[in-house]
Every structure is written in structure tokens, then in C-alpha cells.
Image (tube, rainbow, N blue to C red):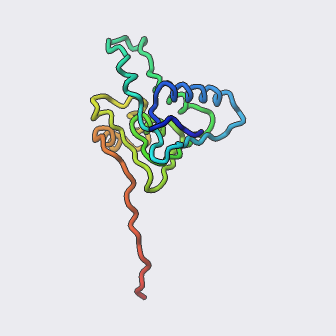
Amino acid sequence: MTIDYPPVNVQGQEMLADLSSLALRLERDREVKVVVFQSANPDIWVCHYDTNLLRDMSMDTVPRDEAKLLDLQAVLERISKLPQATIAKIEGFARGGGHEFALACDMRFAARGKYKFMQMEVAMGILPCGGGASRMARQVGLGRALEIILSAEILMPMRQKRTEPSTKH
């Protein structure tokens, strides 16, 4: 599945509706065994959730049993429960909701030297809402997840040190 929502693959209503529709088809499809999510944009896998969608939400307190999931939460929860193996093939930026999308997949493979991850929500005064906190804590441990979320820093691959063969005998 190639993600192509120019210019930067923001998780807006169109992408979320398409992902929800895809998840519905995959839930019923017993022929497909593996789904690989990749980006048409070589610099950005999935940028982030469209925060403009948050402005339309009521900030009134509601009882827990009346609380509704955001579209992003509902879609990523469906993807995380698909019967197929799901793989995020990441080249470029996966930040915020894009990083949470990758975390919702069963596996993540990032191109060495080409990926960047980020959970920038805390720097914006909000919390990760697409499962980033809970899924990341399960995958990297609570301490590292808190460091990633609270720092709001870009996580980039470490440069590989090139080792030269020894010429000593």
C-alpha cells in the first residue's frame, strides 16, 4: 500500500477514511497475508495528524463511557488488529501520528540513513493521541518511551563507524 497524499502525507480526513476503508477490506480478506505500507514521497513516510481536526473537537469533559476515539485512534487500532502481518517500510520522516502509524504495524523497517522519527506533541502542548505512548512503552520500555515523548526531539539513525581491516599481523 503506497501512501500518497501530497505534499507531505498529513493524516487528514481523506487519508484516515482511505485507511479505514482499507482496514475494513483487509479484515474480510483471507487471501492477503502481508501488507507493506510505504510512501510515495522519498522524504516523508507519514508526516503527522492534521491538528486542525483537533480544533473542531469540544473540550468539555465527558464521562468515560461516552468518550469517543479520534478518527486517528480508531484507524490505528483497526490496523493494529488486522489478521495480516503489517509492515511499515519507512524512508524519510515519520513524526507524530506518522510515527504512531508505524508503531501500530506489526513490524517496522527503516532505511538506514534515511529515516527520522519524532513525537512532537508535547512541544505543541498536547499528548500523543494515536497510541504513541502505550504502544511505544510496550515496544521500547517505559523509560525510553517517556524520553522520546517528553523530549520531542528528532530520532535519527546513528552514523555507522567504518572499521578498516587491521593490517597488523
Relative height, residue 93 to residue 31 (above, below): below
On the picture, is 60 further left or further right than 169? left
Spot occupied by residue 124 in the image (x, y as percentages of width and height): 29, 32
Asked which quadrant contains residue 57, the reply is top left
Residue pictured at 42% horizontal, 81% vertical = 166
In front here: 7 or 159? 7
Spot occupied by residue 160 in the image (x, y as percentages of width and height): 40, 63
Relative height, residue 41 to residue 135 (above, below): below
Residue furthest to the right in view is 31
On the picture, is 142 further left or further right than 91? left
Q: Which quadrant, please, contains the N terminus?
A: top right
Spot occupied by residue 62 in the image (x, y as percentages of width and height): 36, 11
Residue pictured at 47% horizontal, 23% vertical = 71
On the picture, is 72 further left or further right than 18? left
On the picture, is 128 further left or further right than 85? left
Q: Which quadrant, please, contains the C terminus?
A: bottom left
Residue furthest to the bottom in view is 169
* Total number of numbered discs in the rendering: 0
Residue pictured at 40% horizontal, 22% vertical = 53
Spot occupied by residue 55 in the image (x, y as percentages of width and height): 35, 20
Residue furthest to the front in view is 7
In front here: 6 or 26? 6
Residue pictured at 53% horizontal, 33% vertical = 80
Asked which quadrant contains residue 97, the reply is top left
